[in-house]
Amino acid sequence: MSFREYVSKAGGFQKLFKALRQQGIKVEDRINEAFSKDYPLFAKIGYKVEELDSGIARLSFPMTEMIMRTGGIVHGGIIMYSLDTTMGLAVMTLNPGIDQYTVELKTNFLEPLKDGPFQVKGKVVRIGRHTAVAEGEVVDINGRVCSKALGTWFLLNSI
């Protein structure tokens, strides 16, 4: 069963996460399994969900040649995908619905991303009935904030 099917069957993101926790299943492990299976780019980059809680998410990923651009730094598209995924997961933890879409994502690239592994943090700033706003950042192994982002998600109650 795909992640999308699990969410639909459970009746929404929040209900799925609550049911998993009640069964003693670590939500982060289940998300890692489902996303690695359903989203090939997630697996190929080597993302790992480290933390998923109410309004927050944290992922990690290694530095590999596959995600580099000229100059030996992480490609900006990978950085944005990392932020979109992490911030989106943070939104999912508070989304009572069964789907969501990124409406807007603004990213500032502050430092070249070259010293991995990397941590990506996402936090919900505000959630309403139809939209959510989250902020995120990518940090290198030295604790340097290399990218900051702010995004908006449209929340869906049904498909």
Image (cartoon, rainbow, N blue to C red):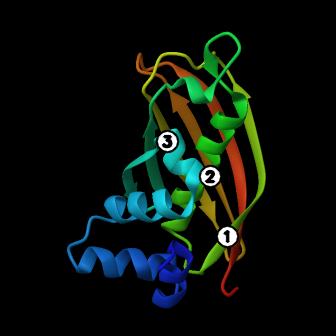
First along the sequence among labels 1 and 3: 1
Q: Residues within 10 Å of mark 1 (few under 14, many from 20)?
A: many
Question: Mark 3 belongs to which amino acid?
Answer: Lys
Question: Mark 1 belongs to which amino acid?
Answer: Gln
What's the distance in space between the residues labelled 1 and 2, CA to CA?
A: 13 Å
What's the distance in space between the residues labelled 1 and 3, CA to CA?
A: 19 Å
The label on residue 134 is: 2
Tell me where residue 80 appears, x and y as whole percent.
68, 39
Q: Quadrant of residue 52?
A: bottom left
Q: Is residue 53 visible?
A: no
Task: Say if mark 1 contacts mark 2, CB within 8 Å.
Answer: no
Residue at 57%, 54% (x, y): give it: 40
SS assignment at label 3: strand
Task: Say if mark 1 contacts mark 3, CB within 8 Å.
Answer: no
Residue at 43%, 20% (x, y): give it: 143
First along the sequence among labels 3 and 2: 3
Quadrant the C terminus occupies = bottom right
Of 100 and 9, the residue lying toward us: 9
Residue carrying label 1: 100
Q: Is residue 16 visible?
A: yes
Residue carrying label 3: 121
